[in-house]
Amino acid sequence: MFIGRNRELTALEKLYASDKFEFAVIYGRRRVGKTALINQFIADKKTIYFMGVESNARQNLENFSKSIIEYSSGIGAETSFLSFQAALEYVFLLAEKERIILAIDEYPYVARSSKSLASTLQLFIDKYKDTSRLMLILCGSSMSYMEDHVLAYKAPLYGRRTAQMKLLPFDFDETCHYFKNLSDEDKALVYGIVGGTPQYLLQINDTWSVEDNIKNTFLNPISFLYEEPVNLMKQEVREPAIYTAIITAIAQGASRMSEISSKVGENTNVCSTYIKNLIDLGLVRKETPYGEKASRKTIYSIADNMFRFWHRFVLGNNSMIARGACDLVYKRIEPQLPDYMGKVFEDICSQYLWKQLLCGKCPVEFTSLGRWWGNDPIEKKQAEIDIMGEQDKNTALFAECKWTSEKTDLGVLETLIKRSRLFSYKKIHFYLFSKSGFTAGCRSEAEKLGNVTLVSYGDILS
């Protein structure tokens, strides 16, 4: 089942239609669907597809040679080119006669085993780019390698690419296409549990309840996701234990650097380096109050829902899960789900606002969105705003998001209006987002004010 990625497929088709040399770089986290995208694109096209393996140069050259010979003759053969240089030149020359795609998947494995590969590619691109009709695709899961050794200014291939795509997990709207049989509320819960990574979404059975899916995917020792975060860390980093400890500390509520380092038992300088790597991997998010560039108020949160859920609810219950006590563990998890979903719902609401902006339906043309927290000098206590976005120095929007079983009442709107007065914007629009709708008093006041938009969860899905 292939869902989504329409924008990426359209871009690749446009490159292919040029019928001249093209060089696309596709990269992103593991499990995000890079190989599936490539396979969907090349399905009806003449392609030499080669996936690198974590082995030596000889093994990769043999595999690459087999892919080329099988394309040329339609027969699998054991013969091999003498070098990557000979193999690549053969492909470039072959593409002078017809449109061919050369897709090298997991390129970092090949390039690490053959140090001269990037320079060899550079040589042939410069030599044949005006005569060859080759469409070259380099794909990799190691984002740091792709950014430093393929896309970076000092990399041999810099300036040769004609397109690059960083594949990200699906947003909430896209994940809903996977789950046609789930109720509206369960769609949000599943997104909060596994996020938007395609490989994780495929583990969910949309004919089951959320409870059964949690038990089967997270509380089952033989399931794919049971050890996925640990296995992924082992593939991505050298010291997975420290990274796991940091993610767990953040997932369990430690948000400031001092709190994280205290829980992990490492000094802040050490933790800072590890956290930067986790941010680069797309697993951790660094946040400052909206509008503040550098701040002592900086906090860290888990950017990936699956990692957030696993580190908060699974890791600490490992011993019980291993003994088959999944029912007991779920009873511990279930009461905490509404609180857990609060942050997830904020993300869903932010995505909704971006879509409203892009289709011209948002009254405030903001340039970014974020949370705000700080001191309220009037109330003399700390205050938070779930979402705010600025159009200019005079115009902004403020939003509050409520994932509760009760209807959102007038008090929530009044509190949001009070907090907006901590800022000096003259033109303000308010959004209230609610899982369960709004009370009559809240609706009446919103209509009277005229600068308030009330959005029920059902409106986000429609």
Image (cartoon, rainbow, N blue to C red):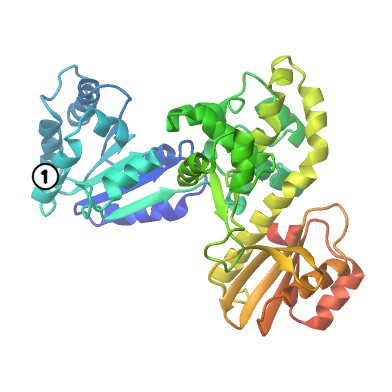
Instruction: Classify 10 Å Cα crowding around label 1: few (below 14), some (14-19), many (20 and above).
Output: some
Mark yes or no: residue 306 visible.
Answer: no
Q: Residue at x 50, y 42 (%)?
A: 278
Please state the horizontal and vertical placement of residue 181, each as a whole percent of the image.
70, 41
The C terminus lies in which quarter of the figure? Answer: bottom right
Q: Residue at x 85, y 62 (%)?
A: 408
- Looking at this view, name the residue that lies furthest to the front: 267
Instruction: Please name the amino acid that badge 1 sits on.
Output: Leu
| Left or right side of 345 for 440 | right
Number of numbered discs overlaid on the protein picture = 1
Mark yes or no: residue 311 visible.
Answer: yes
Q: Is residue 316 above or below residue 292?
A: above
- Asked whether 253 or 125 is in front, the reply is 253
In the rendered image, which residue does mark 1 sit on? 123
| Left or right side of 97 for 177 | right
Please state the horizontal and vertical placement of residue 77, each as a whole percent of the image.
19, 19
| Left or right side of 340 for 228 | left
- Looking at this view, name the residue that lies furthest to the top: 323
Which quadrant of the view contains residue 237?
top left
Please state the horizontal and vertical placement of residue 332, each as a whole percent of the image.
81, 31
Please state the horizontal and vertical placement of residue 306, each as a whole percent of the image.
61, 38
- Asked whether 317 or 365 is in front, the reply is 317
Which quadrant of the view contains residue 315?
top right
Q: Residue at x 87, y 70 (%)?
A: 410
Which quadrant of the view contains residue 81?
top left
Q: Secondary structure at mark 1?
A: helix
